Image (tube, rainbow, N blue to C red):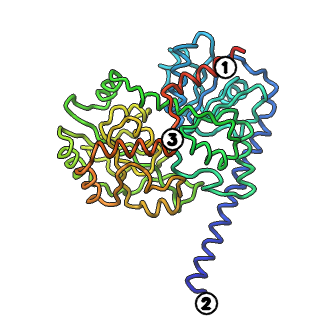
C-alpha cells in the first residue's frame, strides 16, 4: 500500500510529465507555424512599415500605445504604423487618425508582421514568425524592476523550453530595461545577450515621471469620479491554476475588506475616497469584489492612465508597483497568500526588500495605512530604486521612436 510520501511523489511525477508534454506541444506548434509562414519571407520588406502589438491584452495600451502615439504625432507623414488588436472593429477612431489596424492572427496580421521594417511588442508574439534579416525587433517588455522570475528561472530549464526561448531570443534586436538588475536577470533567464538590453526605462513610465494634470483630470471624469473624490486603486496580479504557467490565469478571493480600507484612507489622508478594482488582463474570472459601490476598471484599456488618476494604490505582486512608485504616491501590498505566492512564483528581489508596506491581513493593512509615513516611504523608495540600479529616463518613448525613425529611413 502506497504511503503519503509515495502518493505525493507520484503526483509530482505526473505533474512534471504533463508540464514537459505542454512544453513539447508549444514548441512543436511554433515550428509548424514558422514552416507554414516561410513563403511570406519572399515578400519584400516595406521600409517604412512599423508593426506594434500589445501581446498581453491585444488592445491599444501599454508601451506599444505610447510608442504608436508618439510615432503618429512626430513621424506620421513618413511611416506606415500598423496596430494589431483582437477586436479591430472597436478602433475606427485610430483608422481615422491614420493608423492601419489589423486583427490579431488574421491573414493581414501575418502579412504585415512579416513585411514590416520594425516589429515592436511588450511581451512576445514573434517566436512563431520566421523574421527576415532586414527586420528589426524591439521588445519593450511589460514590467519594471526585477520582481517576479521569468523564463528558465521560473518555468523550466529543459532543453525543449530553452529551444523555445531561443526562437524569440535570436530574433530580438533590442530589449528595453528599467534597471541594471533587470538586465542581469532577464538576459540570462530569456537567453538574450546583455548587449541587446537598452536601459532607458519603459515608454509607459514617461507619464509617471512627467505627469500630465490635464490628462489626469480627463481620466478621472471618464471613470466617473467627482472633483472632491480621491481614488484608491486595487490592482492585483493573476494566479495560475495549480501554479501551472501553461494554464489559464484566474482571479481568487483576495480577501480585501474594501470598506475598511476606504475608512482607513479617509482617516489617515482626509477627504472622500472611492474604491476601484482592476484585474490583470489575463484573468478569466472576475466575480470577486465587483459590488455596486466598487468601480470596476478592468476593461479600461490603459493601466497607466489609471495610475495617473489614482491617489493611492493597493497591490500584491504586479509590476505596476514599480510604475506607481515613480509617482511618489502611497502604495500598499495586500496578499493573504503572500507566503505561498513567493514560494511558488519566486522573485529576484526578496519581497522583504520592496519599499511598499506589506500586509497579509486586513488588520495589518489598516495599521499600515493609518501609520503611513511619507518621509519613510520616500526614502525607502529612493533606496530601492538605487539598489536595483534604476534607469528610467522619462524619455524612453522619444528614444525608441527616434531609433525606429532612423531604422525606417536609413
Answer left or right for 400 relative to 222.
Answer: right
**Which residue is pictured at 50% across the width and 63% down the height?**
343
Question: Mark 3 or mark 1: which comes first in sequence?
Answer: 1
Foreground residue, 221 or 215?
215
**Disc 2: which residue:** 1
Q: What's the mark number on residue 196? A: none
Whether residue 388 sits left or right of residue 403 in the image: it is left
Q: Nearer the viewer, mark 3 or mark 2?
A: 3
Q: Secondary structure at mark 2?
A: loop
Compute the Cα span from label 3 to label 1.
28 Å
Q: Position of residue 234 (x, y in %)?
A: 35, 45
Q: Is residue 224 above or below residue 215?
A: below
Find residue 49 and name its label: 1
Q: Quadrant of the N terminus?
A: bottom right
* Left or right placement of residue 165 versus residue 211 in this view: right
The residue tagged 3 is: 144
Q: CA distance from mark 3 to mark 2?
A: 50 Å
Mark 1, secondary structure of its residue: strand
Q: Upstream in the sequence, badge 3 or badge 2?
A: 2
The residue depicted at 47 percent of the width and 59 percent of the height is 341
Q: Residue furthest bottom?
A: 1
Instruction: Look at the numbered discs 3 and 2 and tell me whether their residues touch, using CB distance below 8 Å.
Output: no
Q: Position of residue 172 (x, y in %)?
A: 69, 36
Which of discs 2 and 1 lies nearer the camera? The answer is: 1
Query: Element at badge 3?
Result: loop
Amino acid at each position: 500500500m502506497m504511503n503519503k510520501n509515495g502518493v505525493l511523489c507520484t503526483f509530482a511525477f505526473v505533474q512534471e510529465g504533463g508540464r514537459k508534454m505542454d512544453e513539447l506541444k508549444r514548441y512543436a506548434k511554433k515550428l509548424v507555424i514558422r514552416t507554414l509562414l516561410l513563403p511570406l519571407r519572399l515578400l519584400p520588406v516595406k521600409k517604412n512599415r512599423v508593426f506594434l502589438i500589445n501581446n498581453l491584452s491585444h488592445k491599444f495600451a501599454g508601451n506599444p500605445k505610447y510608442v504608436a502615439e508618439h510615432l503618429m504625432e512626430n513621424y506620421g507623414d513618413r511611416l506606415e504604423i500598423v496596430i494589431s488588436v483582437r477586436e479591430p472593429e472597436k478602433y475606427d477612431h485610430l483608422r481615422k487618425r491614420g493608423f492601419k489596424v489589423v486583427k490579431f492572427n488574421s491573414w493581414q496580421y501575418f502579412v504585415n508582421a512579416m513585411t514590416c521594417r520594425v516589429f515592436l511588442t511588450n511581451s512576445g508574439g514573434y517566436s512563431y514568425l520566421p523574421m527576415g534579416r532586414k527586420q528589426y525587433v524591439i521588445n519593450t517588455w511589460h514590467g519594471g524592476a526585477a520582481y517576479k522570475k521569468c523564463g528558465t528561472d521560473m518555468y523550466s530549464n529543459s532543453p525543449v523550453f530553452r529551444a523555445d526561448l531561443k526562437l524569440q531570443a535570436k530574433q530580438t534586436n533590442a530589449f528595453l530595461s528599467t534597471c541594471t538588475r533587470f538586465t542581469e536577470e532577464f538576459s540570462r533567464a530569456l537567453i538574450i545577450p546583455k548587449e541587446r538590453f537598452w536601459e532607458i526605462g519603459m515608454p509607459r513610465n514617461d507619464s509617471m515621471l512627467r505627469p500630465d494634470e490635464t490628462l489626469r483630470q480627463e481620466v478621472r471624469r471618464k471613470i466617473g469620479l467627482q472633483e472632491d473624490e480621491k481614488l484608491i486603486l486595487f490592482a492585483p496580479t493573476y494566479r495560475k491554476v495549480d501554479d501551472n504557467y501553461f494554464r489559464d490565469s484566474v482571479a481568487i478571493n483576495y480577501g480585501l475588506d474594501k470598506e475598511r480600507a476606504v475608512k482607513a484612507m479617509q482617516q489617515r489622508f482626509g477627504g472622500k475616497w472611492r474604491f476601484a478594482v482592476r484585474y490583470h488582463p489575463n484573468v478569466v474570472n472576475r466575480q470577486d469584489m465587483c459590488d455596486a459601490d466598487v468601480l470596476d476598471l478592468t476593461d479600461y484599456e490603459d493601466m497607466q492612465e489609471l495610475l495617473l488618476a489614482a491617489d493611492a494604490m493597493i497591490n500584491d505582486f504586479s509590476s505596476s508597483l514599480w510604475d506607481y512608485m515613480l509617482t511618489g504616491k502611497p502604495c500598499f501590498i495586500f496578499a493573504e497568500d503572500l507566503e505561498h505566492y513567493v514560494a511558488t512564483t519566486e522573485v529576484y528581489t526578496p519581497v522583504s526588500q520592496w519599499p511598499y508596506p506589506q500586509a497579509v491581513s486586513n488588520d495589518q493593512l489598516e495599521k499600515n495605512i493609518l501609520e503611513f509615513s511619507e518621509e519613510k516611504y520616500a526614502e525607502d523608495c529612493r533606496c530601492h530604486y538605487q539598489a536595483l540600479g534604476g534607469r528610467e529616463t522619462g524619455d524612453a518613448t522619444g528614444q525608441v521612436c527616434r531609433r525606429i525613425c532612423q531604422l525606417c529611413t536609413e
